Amino acid sequence: MTCVVCKRTATTPLYEVNGFEIVRCPCGLVRTVLPDGFDPASIYTDAYFQGGHPDGYADYAGSGEALRHEFRRIVAALRRHVSGGQLIELGCAYGYFLDEASVAFDVCGVDISDHARQVCAARGHQVAPAATPAFLAEHGPFDAAVMLDVLEHMPDPAAVLDDLHRAMKPGAQLMITTGDHGAVLSRVMGRRWRLMTPPQHLWFFSPRTVSALLARHGFRVHTTEHPWKQVPLALVAYQATRYLGGQGLVRRFVPPGRVPLNLFDAMRIIAERR
């Protein structure tokens, strides 16, 4: 796999996690080495969303209210830079963000998961399995695009960004959230960092490397922040018990609700399409 930032194949091995080698590129980007023929789509079944995957969600559907509350906050942050128009979300899951964004935008989505797309379609959203040029042309040009914790999952984010750039208006806004591998917590935890979850996560960005990636594909980063989030309590408990044991008990005993959280190892990037 070629580095999406520096386009080189030379790497320095760091460690092995979940049977996958983690390496660092000369530019500083850290990435997962995937075996030939690996299909990332195989991860994102209904089990990923409903407590059947150790690095997934405890109960995505049951956390809908908490997720919507956070997504309303994200929509408000985006609207400080773009008031409305056409919006596409890549990695839209069950469509809860699309619900909230539809107050101000005409929305559509993309998700690799057959299960997630079925849920979205049942609730009236137009969602495709990939951001193909045809789908983008049909629904664009876009005033805004959103990737919430999805860039790190993409086998080829460079190709996606190129297609997205062509489908966005000059001056349109791109919002990305992803882990910050340059954060103190990541450096201290190393292979045990909470977001070091290959093969779910393939790329581990820092503010410098994600800005370099976006600049290479025609976007100018103007906002980088590490915001507080309102996180479903079930998700916090589920991810904590990944290390402690007892994940199977979370759905039975953890009540619904949300908790404010900021470990300063997750960043929100907003960039302008040049």
Image (tube, helix red, strand yellow):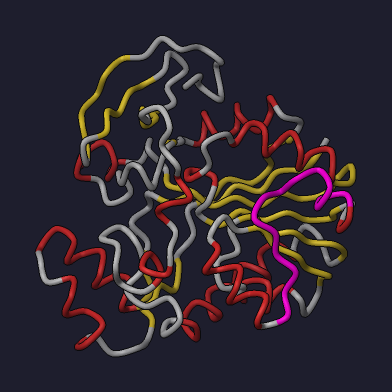
Q: Is residue 205 visible?
A: yes
Please give the name of the residue rendered at 78% of the width and 68% of the height, measured from the top-left corner.
Answer: 107
Q: Where is residue 57 drawn, in percent x and y?
A: 36, 68
Q: Is residue 125 magenta?
A: yes
Please give the name of the residue rendered at 43% of the width and 76% of the height, measured from the top-left corner.
Answer: 60
Give the camera-side residue of 236 and 197.
197
Quadrant of res 105: bottom right
Please give the name of the residue rendered at 89% of the width and 42% of the height, measured from the top-left corner.
Answer: 170
Q: Where is residue 177 drawn, in percent x and y?
A: 54, 52
Number of dots carrying numbers: 0
Q: Is residue 96 visible?
A: no
Q: Where is residue 109 drawn, in percent x and y?
A: 70, 62
Quarter of the image for the C terminus: give it. top right
Q: Which residues are magenta?
A: 124-137
Please give the name of the residue rendered at 62% of the width and 76% of the height, measured from the top-left corner.
Answer: 72
Quadrant of res 100: bottom right
Q: Is residue 135 magenta?
A: yes
Give above or below for 259 relative to 207.
Answer: below
Position of 247 with respect to 26 (left or right) is left
Q: Where is residue 54 drawn, in percent x and y?
A: 25, 60
Position of 211 with respect to 260 (left or right) is right
